[in-house]
Image: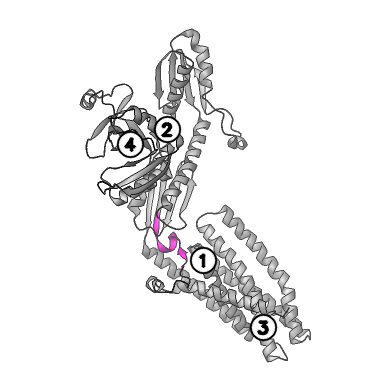
Amino acid sequence: MLHFARWKVILVLIISLVGILLALPNLLSPKALEVLPDWIPAKQVNLGLDLQGGAHLLYQMDEKELVQDWLKNIRGDVREALRRAKIGYTGLRVSLPVKTVSVRVRKPEDFDRALTRLRDISVPLSSGLAFTGQQGNTVDVERGDTGQILLKITDQGLFQRVSSAIEASIETVRRRIDAFGTTEPTIQRQGRDRILVQVPGIKDVSRLKALVGETGKLEFRMVDTTSSVSQAQQSGRAPPGTELVQSEDGFSSVYLLKSRAIVTGESLVDAQPGFDQRTNEPVVTFRFDTAGARRFGRVTQANVGRPFAIVLDNKVVSAPVIREPILGGTGQISGSFTVQQANDMSVLLRSGALPAKLTILEERTVGASLGADSIAAGKIAALIGLLMVLGFILISYGLFGVFANLALAINIALIIGVLSMLQATLTLPGIAGIVLTIGMAVDANVLIFERIREESRAGKSVIAAVDSGYSRALGTILDANITTFIAALVLFWLGSGPIRGFAVTLSIGIITSVFTAFTLTRLMVAQWVRMRRPQEVPI
């Protein structure tokens, strides 16, 4: 147990030195890191929201807008289904308060056939909700009291729709925040229709709110040139199949657009900021998928010389005239953008549109002073705990306590080094995990040293007592650490935010403490025995 092959000694020393080397950058200032050679590790531990400050935002999804868009889609499906079946209809309306689409069939003899066709629009609830006991359809199709057909959104269908929209929004928000280059943002669902966003270290909170809060719904629509915008404004209503849309392109305050979109942002596969080669102004270049490119090319080919509008979140950002057919599936959006605006718009388009608007319910900005106080408190707690443990071990075990203390210091360096290498985020609970790890590492040394004492009192030689102490304590140490490691993995798997931070440092600390408390101290003791050849154990 005390024999170490040369390669094992070299491996233990290399691991210890690499851990120290990875941890050292955390003691240096950013300016000092810049002058270091490239071959020296320069990564520092990322600090969480509770340590370095940042943004804490709680969003709520606009359920009314979600229902409104769903009802519009249902209305379009009804129109399409009845036209394909060649069934005449009238009075196709949307009623938002009761979440219903109603339609009246012109001929009574077509009523049953229309009812059958429209029931195909309703789909069963997702099988993923089967365990909850929920059954039925997302939309109920019924006969109305006045001879109408009613398509009503069910409560279960709405719950499923909101849940899907929240999950999709979380992924969209995550892609947008990733564009900031921040590390370990927390984005999670809260309740039925809320999303919690925590971004540590963010400096431009207003830009973050603008980027996350934008719906990002992109549409390409034709401009209606057959009707007058002023007449539509004076009458208070647009001609059938058109609508008035506000503009931000700097040429007109409002446009009269066709209601139906040529292509939507769902057909985009890429969007990047760039510069117009003619004017050198910032623009956003985009590229459609195959189906979107084909549809866009067909429409532009048939409308050369007519203007079309690029609409983002129901506002016209550009309304160029089609000079020639756009058949390549690529184009650009211009509109007197700044470089940052072009970059933010490309992020919005690449990340995809939110299912509905997100409204801020709660906003907290954690300042740097709070983070500094937390770091200082954590350092003091860790330092006090470390000094007390070092003193106890030194007084209790003498020279062996020195070995344990050296191993403990290397253990802390290994934890910090691994956190730096993995670019993990250190939170205040994470500091608590490191302090707990210190206690666990000492506990392993106590088990070993007490076993050595017992063997030495039983009359065994120094080598036999030390060898027996390490070999017999190994099983107990592994059992205790493996069970704690499993608990840490469960915390990481099921937890989030600060709980995960605690689990990360605890998991890393368990692995490093087993290495330092058992292997590293055993190497130190073995070298001491070989060099001094003591007659008794100084413990």
Marks 1 & 4, CB-CB < 8 Å contact: no
Q: Amino acid at mark 4?
A: Val
Question: Disc 1 marks which residue?
Answer: 421
Pointer 1 or 4: first along the chain: 4
- The numbered dot on residue 294 is 2
Real-space Cα separation, disc 2 to disc 1, in angstroms: 47 Å
Specify the segment rendered in magenta: 40-55
Question: Disc 3 marks which residue?
Answer: 525
Real-space Cα separation, disc 3 to disc 4, in angstroms: 74 Å
Question: Disc 4 marks which residue?
Answer: 311
Q: Amino acid at mark 2?
A: Arg
Q: Amino acid at mark 1?
A: Met
Q: Nearer the viewer, residue 113 or 227?
A: 227
Image spot of residue 155 (x, y percent): 50, 31
Pointer 2 or 1: first along the chain: 2
Real-space Cα separation, disc 4 to disc 2, in angstroms: 20 Å
